[in-house]
Image (spheres, grey):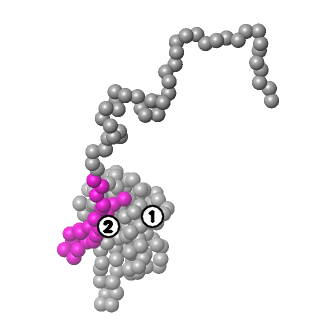
Amino acid sequence: MTGAHSQVAGETSPDRRALPARFHLDAGAAAVYLDARRVVMRRSLSGLPLTLTLPVTAYRGVAVRIEARDDTRLGAVIELAHADPALTIPLLATDDLDEATLAWEGWSETFGLPMLLRETDGSLREMEARPSIETAEPLPRRRRPVAGRRRPRFLMRRKCGHSRPMPVIEGTEIIART
C-alpha cells in the first residue's frame, strides 16, 4: 500500500497491518493517531489546541471516492467517513484502482465498518449489506414435559441404595501392591 502514487496529504498512507499509526493531515495542521478501536485527532481551533478522541464505531464506514485526475486518468481516495465532514479522515489517495480496491476492503475489514461509495453529489451509499442474524426462542431441551416429575431414563434402571450399615471385615488387611 505504500507505492509511489499512494499518498495522504503529501505523506505515505498509513498501513492497516501496522496499526496503531500516526500521520498528519492538511499539511501538518492536524495530527491523527489511528488504531483499530479509536481515532485521536489533534488540531488547533481558533488558535487553541483541540484533541478529539472518537471510537471507530462513531464513523459511518470506509468510503471510496473516484476522481478524474486529468482527461485520461482516474484516481481513488479511501477515507474513514464521518457524518461531520471535518472529522472525515483520508486513508489513501492513489492512481492505481486495483490498489484502492484492496485497501478499501482491507480497511473495512480492519475497522468492522461497511464499505461505502461516495457519490458525485457527496452522499454515501453502502455497497454490501451486512447479513442480519435473526434469533428465535430456543427450543425446549426435553421432549417430554412430564420429565420434571420422573427420574431420567438412564436412572430408571438403577436400584435405590439401602440405609443399613455396610459390612466391615476385621482381622485381615487388604493391601494392593504392584
Q: Is mark 2 on a helix, strand or loop?
A: strand
* Image quarter hosting the C terminus: top right
Q: What residue type is labelled 2?
A: Met
Q: Horizontal placement of 35 versus 63: left or right?
A: right
Q: Who is closer to the viewer here, 132 or 107?
A: 132
Numbered mark located on residue 115 in the image: 2
Q: Looking at the image, which residue is at 37% across and 28% down? A: 150
Q: Magenta stretch: residue 160 in it?
A: no
Q: Position of residue 167 (x, y in %)?
A: 64, 12
Q: Is residue 47 above or below residue 15?
A: above
Q: Which residue bears the numbered disc 1? A: 16
Q: In this view, does 151 lie above or below 90?
A: above
Q: Looking at the image, which residue is at 77% across and 24% down? A: 176
Looking at the image, can residue 133 be seen? yes
- Distance of label 1 from label 2 (alpha carbons): 15 Å
Q: Looking at the image, which residue is at 33% across and 40% down? A: 143
